[in-house]
Amino acid sequence: MITREEITSYLKSLQKSICEGLEQEDGKAKFSEDHWSHHQGGGGISRVISHGNVFEKGGVNFSAVEGDLPSFLSAKVNPDAKRFFATGVSLVMHPNSPMVPIVHMNVRYFETDKGDCWFGGGIDLTPVYVNDAQARYFHHCMKETCDAFDASYYGKFKEWADNYFYINHRNETRGIGGIFYDYLVPDSQHSKEYYFNFMQAVGNTFLKAYRPIVAENKVLSYSEMQKKWQLIRRGRYVEFNLVYDRGTRFGLETGGRIESILMSLPEHASWIYNHQPEEGSQEHDTLEKLTKGIDWIIQDSEFGIRNS
């Protein structure tokens, strides 16, 4: 039986490998490291990068915390459960350039003192300007990982991401999606080890899916107008994270460390009253693609992206 110690050990190694890969891509900035403790038990390691060649601000957080079960989870677990343990890696990267997409990943494990347990997570991409070939490449990486476990996973988890990463009050998706899943509970069909292996596969897909897109876009020039559009899109990102994000809610309702919880927010963002992109512009084209249900999957030869 897979133990919480084995899961946390993998997650620590995942945090380290992702930080190393992102530092290589940035070429200048390094992640600082901050160890912290949770007031009810456990703690974590926050790693933050800022003011680099590529990344203006980003964080890759590891946590393994325990405490009293929050009331909003009581309906999902054994009625006698009183305590929880949760561990995961969560990251958000905000690049300097509007041509390099924002990215988010989370992989996590949860259990109670009465034996309930489940896995959740996902990876999604938020381009300021949608590049169709790169969107297809990113989604192909997600599908390839999912298909190695279950041919139905990509379709289900993509739809879940489309629905989850949706800004209802704007009637638009946060980005081009990816995959999102939650409450994968071990049962007679799939063991805890199976879902742990899936967690590892998703975590290990991150650099493969994201780094080639960063490498291709970080050398592109951009205008002041494009930078202004980036700040507006960052504002949308903030709106989603503060209004809808489950991880933010969980962290706040369990007394989590506020600096780690709000690490996902950019250093700079804008809200411009009633901003309407000009029809036919790149900005308008991007808005047209921030919608649910787009099928991004085509053959590898049509990606048009360097997979380095």
Image (tube, rainbow, N blue to C red):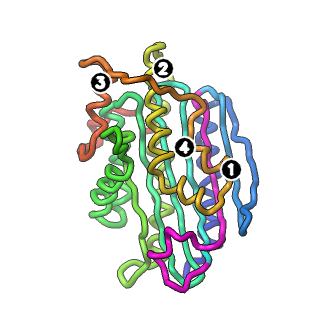
Q: Which mark is residue 227?
A: 2
Taking the magenta stretch, the answer to whether it contains residue 272 is: no
**For the residues marked 1 and 3, what is the alpha-carbon distance in whole angstroms?**
36 Å
**Residue at image coords 65%, 49%:** 260
3D distance between C-alphas at marks 1 and 4: 12 Å
Which residue carries the number 3 mark?
284
Q: Residue furthest top?
A: 224
Mark with earlier residue (2, 1): 1
Q: Earlier in the sequence, mark 4 or mark 3?
A: 4
Q: Is residue 81 magenta?
A: yes
Q: Nearer the viewer, residue 287 or 26?
A: 287
* Position above or below: 274 against 157: above
Q: Is residue 196 visible?
A: no
Circle 4 crowding by C-alpha within 10 Å: few under 14, some 14–19, many from 20: many
Could you tell whether 90 is left or right of 288 in the image?
A: right
Residue 43: percent from left, percent from top: 71, 61
Q: What range is drawn magenta here?
A: 54-82
**Residue 87 place in picture, x, y as percent:** 60, 65
Q: Which mark is residue 46?
A: 1
Secondary structure state at the residue bearing disc 1: strand
Structural crowding at the residue carrying mark 2, measured as other residues with C-alpha within 10 Å and reported as few (<14), some (14–19) or many (≥20) = some
Q: Mark 4: which secondary structure?
A: strand
Q: Which residue is mark 4?
A: 92
Q: Is residue 80 visible?
A: yes
